[in-house]
Image (tube, grey):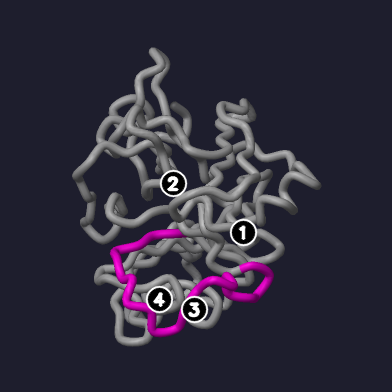
Amino acid sequence: MIWLALAFSMMAAPAAAVECGPKEWRGTDFTICEVDPAREQIRLFLNDDEGRAYGSFREVEEVNGPLAFAMNGGMYHEDLSPVGHYVEDGEEIMRVIPNAGPGNFGMLPNGVFCVEEERARVIETGAYESDMPDCRFASQSGPMLVIDGALHPRFIKGSDSRHIRNGVGASAEGDRVVFAISEEVVNFHDFATLFRDGLGLSDALYFDGKVSRLHAPEIGRSDAGWAMGPIVGVLDDEGAGS
């Protein structure tokens, strides 16, 4: 019967390698995008072949082809250069910044989002420096949200420091990666618990706040606004060979 064949085909169809959708957590709405790093190459974009910063999802697509997913992927200076460690296609563009400093980036412990072969991890900066994994792409940001299952020690439950925020979480093995952006203002504590308790991820890293942007054509969304520095994303099948 037709309906039975259709039901079977839907059950047998593999899940999309990038899946975006809404998630409510502790009274706050988020959009999350889960990426299978074994099936999709997560990568970072900073400058084009002429050395000019892309600055937007549209510019990335004009050079590299369509994106299945993207978001701002780390803090940056006024010239859009990365504040911390940055690696693109195996080339180190910016060294590791290990010391404490002003602002969210310097609220230690901070960390590095590291994309390796068929996996991606969030690694605390000190652990990253001591091991120096072979990252094809890497972006340092801060603060860490979750470190080996524990919330950042400086987060305060019920804090009134609330902003739009985005970040990334990963399993310890690096086989599960979830990006999240808040649709409403949220404090660091509640954002961190989204990754640990709401998504079951052992490590998570904050990317940024007021510049938070998401490109998710699957759900008809592509945010515009201020120019961005590092952009993390996944090229779709058409763009993967560019």
Q: Nearer the viewer, residue 24 or 86?
A: 86
Secondary element type, mark 4: helix
Residue located at (50% from left, 71% from top) = 12
Secondary element type, mark 3: helix
Indicate the amino acid at tag 2: Gly
Binning the other alpha carbons within 10 Å of mark 1 as few (below 14), some (14 to 19) or many (20 upward) gives many
Binning the other alpha carbons within 10 Å of mark 2 as few (below 14), some (14 to 19) or many (20 upward) gives many
Indicate the amino acid at tag 4: Ala
Query: Per the image, is 172 magenta?
Result: no
- Which mark's residue is nearer the viewer, 3 or 4? 3
**Which of disc 2 and disc 1 is earlier in sequence?**
2
Secondary element type, mark 2: loop
Res 22 quadrant in image = bottom left
Q: CA distance from mark 2 to mark 4?
A: 42 Å
**Residue position for label 4:** 5
Q: Which residues are magenta?
A: 147-167
Residue 64, x across and y down, in percent: 38, 29
Residue located at (67% from left, 40% from top) = 135
Residue 23 located left or right of residue 139 = left
